[in-house]
Image (tube, rainbow, N blue to C red):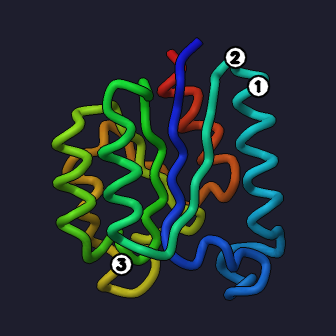
Amino acid sequence: MKKILVLNGPNLNMLGIREPQIYGSQNYNALVEYVLSSAKELGLDVTVKQSNYEGELVTLIQNALGVYDGIVINAGAYTHTSVAILDALKAVSIPTVEVHLSDINARDEFRKFSYISLYAEKVIVGKGFLGYREALEYLGE
């Protein structure tokens, strides 16, 4: 059974509260339940983590080395600013899919650049919760 680490960055814990017109009305617990349910259906062993701290996300990525077969990451705002997260992903060389609930390419100009996409094998944007399932399907193949 493949082991997948799902990482969510800053403010994802505020789903359902923060800008529901962009991110939807379902809360973070609903996202976690959806991801775990999808993983079970797909026969994957998934761990879901969320942090508002860049260094903690870097540490979680580093600690994934030799433990996980894939990473799904929604780095939130760190997507557009964090060379440290990019470097951590490159260091562990674990297949990675970048996911965003909204279509970052149709939003603010600064959101159109992603450091994570410089490493990720696949980038999924604008599909809401379904993007996480698509990422799990991809990594589960």
Describe the element under mark 3 as helix, strand or loop.
helix
Residue hosting label 2: 43
- Badge 3 vs badge 1, beta-carbon distance below 8 Å: no
Q: How many marks?
A: 3
Amino acid type, mark 3: Arg
54 displayed left or right of 104:
left
37 displayed left or right of 3:
right
Residue drawn at x 78%, y 46% as measured from the top left: 34
Amino acid type, mark 2: Gly
Q: Residues within 10 Å of mark 1 (few under 14, many from 20)?
A: few
- Look at the picture and state if 83 lies above or below 93: below
Residue hosting label 3: 111
Question: Which quadrant is the N terminus positioned in?
Answer: top right
Q: Earlier in the sequence, mark 3 or mark 2?
A: 2
What numbered label is drawn on residue 26?
none
- Depth check, mark 3 against mark 2: the one in front is 2
Describe the element under mark 2 as helix, strand or loop.
loop
Describe the element under mark 1 as helix, strand or loop.
helix
Q: Earlier in the sequence, mark 3 or mark 1?
A: 1
Amino acid type, mark 1: Lys
Residue drawn at x 68%, y 87% as measured from the top left: 19
Q: Where, by quadrant of the figure, is residue 97 drawn?
A: top left
- Look at the picture and state if 21 lies above or below 13: below
15 displayed left or right of 6:
right
- Look at the picture and state if 48 lies above or below 28: above
Q: Position of residue 102 (x, y in %)?
A: 56, 68
